[in-house]
């Protein structure tokens, strides 16, 4: 009987040890799986954030491209606008009123179409203070009065902006 008890106790001891090892192995596997899951979650979140940044960046670039896509065309039309403005000034001096009205209508239509596409005239008038960020000084002449020093005396060429970007600075003469 003693032998049977010893065998029985040995079997029970072996069973308890086996359960402890099994519990420890299960615990280790569970810990490893949790760590792996956490790594995958982190990787997923980083990838998702990268993708969101990519979408935002490409969307912003696309909007910028649409805004300035017509910039080359607009810049090439500016000399035509200048010539049309000079022609209107000369026609205004003449006696043919119907020709002046016709050219004025064409000029207005062209200006309105370009304005709808984002082209804006930078309003510059004689007597305004000179701002190097907005104006391009062609030359300086002696100021006719003391109060005109550092101010715009004459505007030689209009300036234009497309959206928030200046595509041609107004060319001005300033008083010295």
Image (spheres, rainbow, N blue to C red):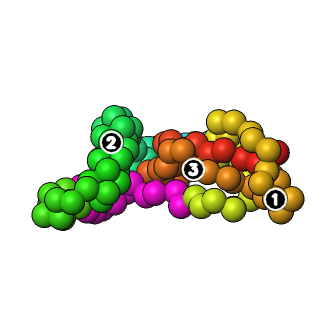
Q: Provide the residue designation for mark 3.
A: 155
Name the front one of labels 1 and 3: 1
For label 3, the SS is strand
Residue holding disc 1: 145
Query: Marks 1 and 3, how far apart in space?
Result: 18 Å
Relative placement, left or right, of 159 versus 105 is right
Q: First in sequence, mark 1 or 3: give its number.
A: 1
Question: Can residue 109 be seen at all in this image of the molecule?
Answer: no
Q: Identify the residue at horizontal 43%, vertical 58% (top origin).
A: 120
Question: Along the horizontal axis of the image, is 62 left or right of 152?
Answer: left
Q: Nearer the viewer, residue 41 or 7?
A: 41
In the rendered image, residue 161, in percent from the top left (x then y), is placed at 48, 51
Where in the figure is residue 16, as x and y percent of width and height?
A: 68, 50
Name which residue lies at 69% across and 62% down.
Answer: 127
Q: Residues within 10 Å of mark 3 (few under 14, many from 20)?
A: some
Is 167 placed left or right of 30 in the picture? left
The crowding category of the residue bearing disc 1, from other C-alpha atoms within 10 Å (few below 14, some 14 to 19, many at least 20), is few
Task: Decide whether residue 2 is among the magenta residues.
Answer: no
Measuring 74% from the left and 39% from the top, which residue is drawn there?
140
Which numbered dot is residue 118? Answer: none
Q: In the image shown, does 57 or 94 lie closer to the viewer?
A: 94
Residue 124: tell me if it is visible: yes
- Residue 77 in the image: x percent, y percent? 31, 40
Q: What percent of the width, then of the height, locates residue 64?
A: 43, 47
Q: In the figure, residue 118 lies in which quadrant?
A: bottom left
Q: Secondary structure at mark 2?
A: helix
Marked residue nearer the N-terminal end (2 or 3): 2
Q: Quadrant of the C terminus?
A: top right
Instruction: First in sequence, mark 2 or 1: give its number.
Output: 2
| Residue at disc 1, secondary structure | loop
Give the extent of the magenta segment: 108-123
């Amino acid at each position: 009987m003693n032998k049977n008890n010893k065998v029985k106790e040995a079997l029970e001891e072996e069973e308890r040890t086996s359960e402890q090892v099994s519990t420890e192995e299960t615990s280790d596997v569970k810990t490893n799986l949790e760590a792996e899951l956490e790594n995958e979650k982190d990787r997923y979140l980083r990838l998702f954030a990268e993708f969101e940044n990519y979408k935002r960046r490409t969307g912003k670039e696309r909007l910028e491209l649409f805004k300035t896509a017509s910039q080359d065309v607009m810049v090439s039309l500016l000399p035509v606008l200048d010539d049309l403005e000079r022609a209107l000034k000369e026609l205004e001096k003449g006696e043919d009123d119907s020709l002046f009205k016709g050219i004025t209508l064409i000029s207005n239509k062209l200006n309105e179409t370009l304005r709808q596409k984002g082209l804006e005239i930078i309003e510059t008038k004689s007597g305004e203070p000179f701002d190097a960020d907005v104006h391009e000084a062609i030359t300086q002449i002696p100021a006719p009065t003391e109060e005109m020093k550092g101010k715009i005396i004459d505007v030689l060429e209009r300036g234009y902006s497309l959206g928030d970007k200046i595509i041609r600075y107004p060319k001005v003469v300033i008083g010295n």
